[in-house]
Image (tube, grey):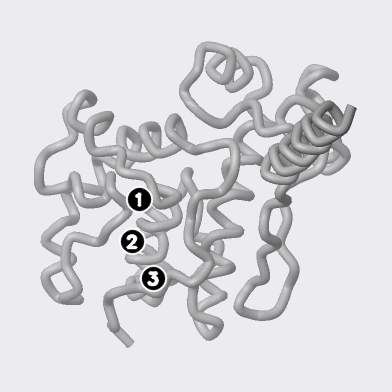
Amino acid sequence: MVTLDIANMFAITFLFLISAVLVVPTASLTSVTGEQLTEFTADDLRSLCPNDYKFCAEKIAEGRCFGNSKRAGELKRKCACSCNAAHHKRIQNCCSTVGRAEMQFCLPLCAYNTTLTELGGSLGLKCVSQLTTWAYCAADAQDNTACCRAKGVPEQCLSFCKGEAPTCDVQSIFSYKPCLKEMDKITTCQKENLAQQPQFDATWEAPCDWE
């Protein structure tokens, strides 16, 4: 009887430890300006994307449009607005967390759909020092080199696929302007490989000091 009780206690303890590991909450994020950052809720997505299918908000709030599975691909097609919103929220949360407080005015350019015109505009030129932050956050700390190569991205542009700026020299960075034409391919790979939970390091600091 004693042996059975000990076995039961061991089993209960084991199950408790396993459940504790499985339910560890995701660490909360705080922006450099002190704002608490979260992913979009289902209600947020319904408000942002009223024309999406009714099932979209719940599924996307659960993180189901992240990754490159067949199911995620279907949701990206059927729930385009909600998925794009979730992806945008992810990169914005990263830039708000690891970017410099004094450069928060650059946040509008921290996006997967930033255009060449916007990057070449007055705000883009003022925010060139944030390139390393944008590259890191767009990749969400993932190396997407294989995907980029498969899509034909030139070697000189592959550092962006790893979330790295190719150089810390503000003058030579403009020699990588041809890579801007590859950004559609690069961002497609980045979004395809986003994990269900954020992978970026909230304590990350940009390696370049261009200020």
Query: Where does label 2 land, which residue?
Result: 120
| Label 2 crowd (10 A; few <14 / some 14-19 / many >=20) | few
Question: Along the polypeptide, which appears first: circle 2 or circle 3?
Answer: 2
Q: Position of residue 21 (x, y in %)?
A: 67, 44
Judging from the image, what secondary structure is the residue with disc 1 in? helix
The amino acid marked with disc number 1 is Leu
Q: Quadrant of residue 182?
A: top left
Q: Regarding mark 3 in the picture, which secondary structure is present there?
A: helix
| Disc 3 residue type (three-letter) | Gln
Q: Could you tell me if the residues under marks 3 and 1 are in contact, i.e. CB atoms within 8 Å?
A: no
Q: Nearer the viewer, residue 173 or 59?
A: 59
Q: Is residue 134 left or right of residue 87?
A: left
**Left or right of 104: which side holds 59?**
right
Label 3: few (<14), some (14–19) or many (≥20) C-alpha neighbours in 10 Å:
many
Residue ID at (33%, 87%) = 211
Residue hosting label 3:
130
Report the residue marked by disc 1: 116
Q: Please state the horizontal and vertical placement of residue 171, each as a whole percent of the image.
A: 14, 75
User: How much space separates mark 3 and mark 1, taking CA atoms?
Assistant: 16 Å
Mark 1 → mark 2, Cα distance in angstroms: 6 Å
